[in-house]
Image (cartoon, grey):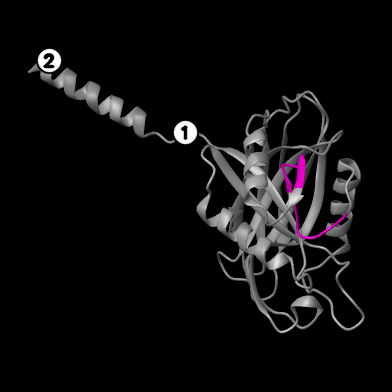
Amino acid sequence: MMVRCLSLFALVGASFFQSAPAAKTPVLLELFTSLGCSSCPPADKLLAEIDRRQPVPGARLIVLSEHVDYWNNAGWSDPFSSGTYTERQQTYDSRFGVEVYTPQLVVDGSTALLGSSWPKASDAIQRALRDATVPVHVTATRAEASAQIEITVAANSIGKKAVVFLALAHDHTESHVGGGENAGRDLSEVAVAYSMKQLAKIDPGHEFKRSFSVSLPANSKSGDARAIAFVRRSDNMQVIGADQVVF
């Protein structure tokens, strides 16, 4: 009986350890897009599929749609567009030595590519998985018209100065486009940014932890927003850690 019990314990123990999920490496995918760009809907759709299917083993793919404002004109403006995202894209492209265009996907701040090209995106994600990362954790608790966000970043072990960012995004949007090249179309997107802030700088070996309140968009409901925290190297803009929560 003792031998049988020990054997059963061994089998149960082996099953437990085999079924424990392996930790996945976060990879941040930033899509620079616009409702006014006729080439962007396929990239928007691909980003939504990546978000839903999580198709790369070992990767936790965190997506973010950032609407640039250079597609706006005198008669129409993309309601999600901001000069903040245009400036971010221009800074990336200056570093990469490429022309600004949409749709453009930037993978972990390290690679820029056509936003509708899954083969190139998959290759870039695989390369990003080989890079060292810093653990990041973000939580969000709703109140009536605000949310309490808490971000924790483990000790910066990369050996380079870094910057902590927080992006707030609509979990899902449906738009009837009133102008631009997509005028009259109904388009859907995921993780559409409506706020992007730099929170702090972190020296090598230092940690970061902060809790603060953020205002929610009008008529916001539980589950319709995302908080995405990420850490970026100061010298080359590479993302070295990220996390997100839907709240």
At numbered mark 2, what does the secondary structure look like: helix, strand or loop? helix
Q: Which residues are magenta?
A: 100-112
Residue 106 visible: yes
Q: Which mark is residue 80?
A: none
Return the disc, 2 or 1, that comes first in the chain's sequence. 2
At numbered mark 1, what does the secondary structure look like: helix, strand or loop? loop
Q: Give the camera-side residue of 128 and 23.
A: 128
Write down the quadrant of residue 25 in the picture.
top right
Q: Residue at x 63, y 51 (%)?
A: 118
Horizontal side of residue 43 vs 103, given as left or right:
left
Write down the quadrant of residue 72 in the picture.
bottom right
Alpha carbons under labels 2 and 1: distance apart: 31 Å
Q: Residue at x 80, y 73 (%)?
A: 78
Looking at the image, do the residues carrying marks 2 and 1 touch, with CB atoms under 8 Å apart? no
Instruction: Identify the residue under disc 1.
Output: 22
Instruction: Identify the residue under disc 2.
Output: 3
Of badges 2 and 1, nearer the viewer stands 1
Horizontal side of residue 103 vs 142, given as left or right:
right
Q: Is residue 11 above or below residue 42?
A: above
Residue 64, image x, y percentages: 69, 55
Q: Is residue 126 above or below residue 113?
A: above
Question: Which part of the image, by quadrant, shows the C terminus?
Answer: bottom right
Q: Give the camera-side residue of 150 and 157.
A: 157
Question: Which part of the image, by quadrant, shows the N terminus?
Answer: top left
Residue 219, image x, y percentages: 64, 76
Write down the quadrant of residue 130 in the picture.
top right
The amino acid on which the numbered mark 1 sits, given as a three-letter code, is: Ala
Q: Residue at x 78, y 37 (%)?
A: 238
Q: Does the magenta-highlighted stretch encompass residue 98?
A: no
Residue 113, image x, y percentages: 75, 49
